[in-house]
Image (spheres, rainbow, N blue to C red):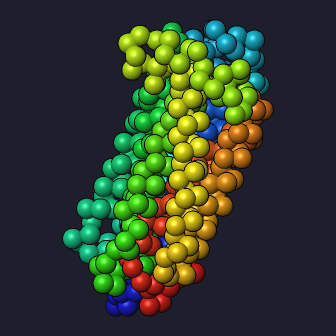
């Protein structure tokens, strides 16, 4: 016997929220892996057979020899011994292992829910799409790593940003479906502020993308002053590259400048948005979400400036990336809430 529809929806939603939490953790772990210089420690990609790490001295020696053949070892880490290598290996291994765990946590409950009839046939496609996107994200991750296994021992900032954006989009897709199961639309109406909330969320994502380029180019390690960039409000090397468009994606000064402008603009518009929304007649859940958006944005600005001034310490930089995802979560939550104009009959939480 299939449980009542509301109970089924809650079970599916809670499963998706667990998957979201794991993706959130994956983004944080990926950031730490990048910040510690661990991302190029595994020089091959074996999605199935690579689940086990080196288990004995001989396997560790073989893995280290493969790493010694890479440009990163030869140009940056030539002084590294096998014990040092193990230190960077484990972070990248855990990052890949968590990706496999997410796949299992997703596919096994999905098959169980399908078998029990909890997920209707006409709903299968959206969940299959999630799984395919997750697999593509794994491929994109390896494509990113490969870019750093050539003469230049740094991953492509384009591929890194695409990998980061992919994680955010998969997370958003699962979170939206989960929220739709927990808070089904009562009347199909949207709040009049829904469009501006969507636009603000888009600006958050654009700022995240610009942060991806900062991370990929390590552009946070120059101009470590605020609010000015050194002695300048606008750095003199802002358009040093030719053609002009390359500056947006490849010029460290321009990439950092753009991230500053986008971050501060996003913060300013969130403050304006919060002030304007205080005048609106909103359900309690929406008010909480809008207040959380303001508070999270304040924290994010403080973390961003601190990370810059202290020249990108790992702890602060990782926290800055984590709070970026938290800010996006809150923004997306507000979009979902305002897409359903009234409170649910039986709100969860």
Vertical placement of residue 197 versus 4, above or below: above
Q: Residue at x 61, y 68 (%)?
A: 291
Displayed quadrant of residue 89:
top right
- Whether residue 281 appears in this view of the structure is yes
Is 245 placed left or right of 227 in the picture? left
Displayed quadrant of residue 142:
top left
| Camera-side residue of 40 and 165 | 165
Q: Residue at x 46, y 43 (%)?
A: 206
- Whether residue 11 appears in this view of the structure is no
Where the N terminus falls, by quadrant?
bottom left
Residue 219 coordinates in the image, percent (x, y): 61, 25
Vertical placement of residue 322 versus 81, above or below: below
Where the C terminus falls, by quadrant?
bottom right
Vertical placement of residue 177 versus 271, above or below: below
Vertical placement of residue 316 versus 276, above or below: above
Residue 228 coordinates in the image, percent (x, y): 69, 29
Question: Residue extending furthest left?
Answer: 122
Residue 45 coordinates in the image, percent (x, y): 47, 31
Is 104 placed left or right of 233 in the picture? left
Residue 166 coordinates in the image, percent (x, y): 42, 44
Q: Residue at x 64, y 58 (%)?
A: 296
Q: Residue at x 70, y 10 (%)?
A: 78
| Camera-side residue of 215 and 78 | 215
How many marks can you see? 0
| Camera-side residue of 254 and 333 | 254
């Amino acid at each position: 016997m299939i449980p009542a529809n509301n109970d089924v929806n809650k079970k599916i939603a809670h499963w998706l929220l667990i998957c979201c939490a794991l993706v959130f953790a994956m983004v944080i772990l990926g950031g730490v892996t990048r910040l510690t210089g661990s991302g190029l420690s595994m020089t091959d990609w074996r999605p199935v057979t690579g689940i086990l790490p080196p288990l004995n001295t001989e396997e560790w020696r073989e893995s280290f020899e493969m790493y010694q053949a890479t440009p990163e070892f030869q140009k940056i880490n030539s002084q590294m011994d096998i014990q040092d290598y193990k230190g960077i290996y484990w972070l990248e291994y855990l990052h890949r292992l968590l990706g496999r765990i997410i796949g299992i946590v997703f596919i096994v409950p999905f098959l169980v829910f399908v078998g029990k009839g909890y997920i209707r046939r006409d709903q299968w496609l959206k969940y299959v799409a999630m799984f395919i996107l997750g697999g593509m994200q794994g491929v994109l991750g390896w494509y990113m790593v490969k870019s750093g296994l050539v003469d230049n021992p740094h991953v492509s900032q384009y591929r890194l940003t695409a990998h980061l954006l992919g994680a955010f989009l998969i997370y958003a897709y699962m979170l939206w479906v989960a929220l739709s199961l927990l808070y089904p639309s009562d009347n199909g109406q949207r709040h009049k502020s829904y469009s501006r909330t969507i636009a603000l969320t888009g600006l958050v994502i654009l700022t995240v993308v610009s942060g991806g380029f900062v991370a990929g180019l390590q552009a946070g390690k120059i101009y470590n002053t605020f609010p000015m960039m050194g002695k300048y409000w606008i750095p003199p090397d802002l358009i040093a590259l030719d053609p002009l468009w390359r500056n947006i994606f490849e010029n460290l000064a321009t990439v950092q400048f753009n991230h500053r402008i986008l971050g501060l603009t996003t913060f300013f518009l969130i403050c304006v948005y919060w002030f304007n929304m205080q005048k609106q007649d909103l359900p309690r859940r929406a008010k909480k979400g809008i207040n959380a958006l303001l508070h999270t944005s304040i924290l994010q600005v403080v973390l961003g400036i601190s990370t810059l001034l202290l020249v990108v310490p790992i702890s602060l930089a990782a926290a800055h990336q984590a709070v970026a995802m938290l800010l996006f979560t809150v923004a997306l939550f507000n979009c979902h809430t305002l897409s359903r104009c009234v409170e649910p009959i039986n709100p969860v939480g």
